[in-house]
Amino acid sequence: MNDFLNPKSMMTPGMAGALVMFLSNAVCFQFPEIAPRWMALLLSFVLGALVVAAVELKPFPRVGFCLVNSLIIFAVAAGSAGFAAKASNPGAGSTAAVLEFLVPSAYAQNATAASAVDHADDMASLKVQLAAAQARIAQQQVQLQDLQRTSATDAAPPAPKSPAKPKNNVNRFFKEW
């Protein structure tokens, strides 16, 4: 017990931090109007003062140990509470921010007469673009047929290929390009 109540021990702030986390979460769950960070800070100073009161020290070291131990207890409690919150809710945090950046939410707009006119103008320009694309495709098909006719009359039949013989290569692990 003397090792646990020793203000120089690191076991004291670690155990007290876990205790502060559990107590502040329990109190703030029952009383939602109390901010968890202030409850944890208050409880960490209470436990830090209890630990320092258990030993006899001069006033200046007593205040120093109380302050340092209380802040360490608070840091352990806040860190473990934050870690527990992220572990219990894996979708929260930076992943949600990245997803919101990559895939933003869509918001519907009210339909107005101006948007209907803009929509009609957009449709007309799309129809013109479609007609131009269809004309280019027809022209390219005619060119392709002409090229196929001229290449069929000009080209001699290809000579049959002999099967390729495998090379005498000791190392067949790498494929030749």
Image (cartoon, rainbow, N blue to C red):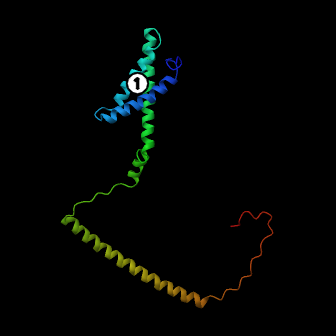
* Residue at (81% x, 69% y) in the render: 168
Q: Residue at x 47, y 24 (%)?
A: 13
Q: Quadrant of residue 173?
A: bottom right
Say left or right for 3 vs 78: right
Numbered-mark total = 1
Q: Position of residue 21 (x, y in %)?
A: 41, 31
Q: Quadrant of the C terminus?
A: bottom right
Q: Which corner quadrant of the image does residue 82 belong to?
A: top left
Work out whether residue 105 or residue 112 is closer to the camera in this orientation and state it. Answer: 105
Q: Looking at the picture, how far across and down is residue 97, in whole percent?
A: 39, 47
Q: Residue at x 43, y 48 (%)?
A: 95
Residue labelled with disc 1: 44
Q: Secondary structure at mark 1?
A: helix
Q: Residue reaching furthest top? A: 58
Query: Is 126 above or below relative to 84?
Result: below
Looking at numbered disc 1 in the image, what kind of residue is underneath it? Ser
Q: Nearer the viewer, residue 122 or 36?
A: 36
The answer to whether residue 31 is left or right of residue 149 is left
In percent of the image, x 66 and y 88: which residue is there?
157
Residue 122 lies in quadrant: bottom left
- Viewer-proximal residue among 12 and 166: 12
